[in-house]
Amino acid sequence: MDIKGFIFDLDGVIVFTDKYHYKAWKTMADEMGIYFDEEINNRLRGVSRMESLEIILENYHGEPLSEEKKIELATKKNDIYRNLLETMTRADVSDEVRNTLDSLHQKGIKVALGSSSKNAKFILEKVELLDAFDAISDGNNITNSKPDPEVFVKAADFIHLKPSECAVVEDAFSGIDAAKSGNMYAVAIGDATNYDKADYKINRFSEILNIC
């Protein structure tokens, strides 16, 4: 096996922003009188903003919402979320993650980000990690969310590699599905280690270095 590039999901792999997503969606849902809890929030992982809103609206029982109103709600959530992200610092990324990314570069392996988030670059800037990636594919350059492989396929293209030459590191089942359907190796970390479709399962970020 010859892996020439690693493509990393952002939330739950490089940084952990689930708590900020939850607080932002919870604020929006409470104001709309919509029931929302952490179990529902878990369904939003790896899903686009508008698709996440539709999942939340499954518990909405008021008057039908126009597309304009839905966009307004999603925008409001993102404004709350970005304000919460302002508190992120370099300390929100572990030395293990930074050192592993450096080691991959030293091995001559390309490193890219593949995230459905439209805030990916903003987050990386806050944690001082933007320069650690050779390319970034995020919610601003895709039309389909995971489990569609688009975000990863484009990331591979950005680093000038074939999908089959890349391994995707993911913590969500939908991300593993996206990697496999995109003809890439799937490396599971976190919750995704419970998924049999993963090619590799790691308990620590640094274990990535054992498979390249």
Image (spheres, rainbow, N blue to C red):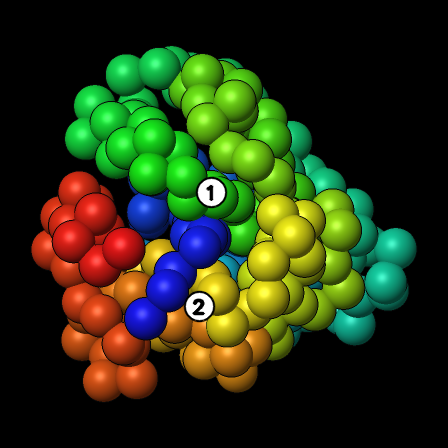
Q: Nearer the viewer, residue 96 or 126?
A: 96
Question: Is residue 49 at all visible to an observer of this figure?
Answer: no
Q: In the displayed structure, would residue 156 be above or below residue 124?
A: below
Image quadrant containing the N terminus: bottom left
Instruction: Bin the neighbour count of mark 1 within 10 Å (Cα to Cα): few under 14, some 14-19, many 20 and up.
Output: many
Q: Nearer the viewer, residue 148 or 209?
A: 209
Question: Which mark sits nearer the N-terminus, 2 or 1?
Answer: 1
Amino acid type, mark 2: Gly
Q: Quadrant of residue 192?
A: bottom left
Query: Which residue is depicted at the point 35% across and 15% down?
Result: 90
In three-dimensional space, the C-alpha distance between marks 2 and 1, rounded to whole angstroms, equals 17 Å
Q: Secondary structure at mark 2?
A: helix
Q: Residue at x 61, y 48 (%)?
A: 159
Where in the figure is residue 6, as x and y percent of width and height?
A: 42, 52
Give the residue at mark 2.
175
Kind of residue sitting beneath label 1 = Val
Q: Which mark is residue 111?
A: 1
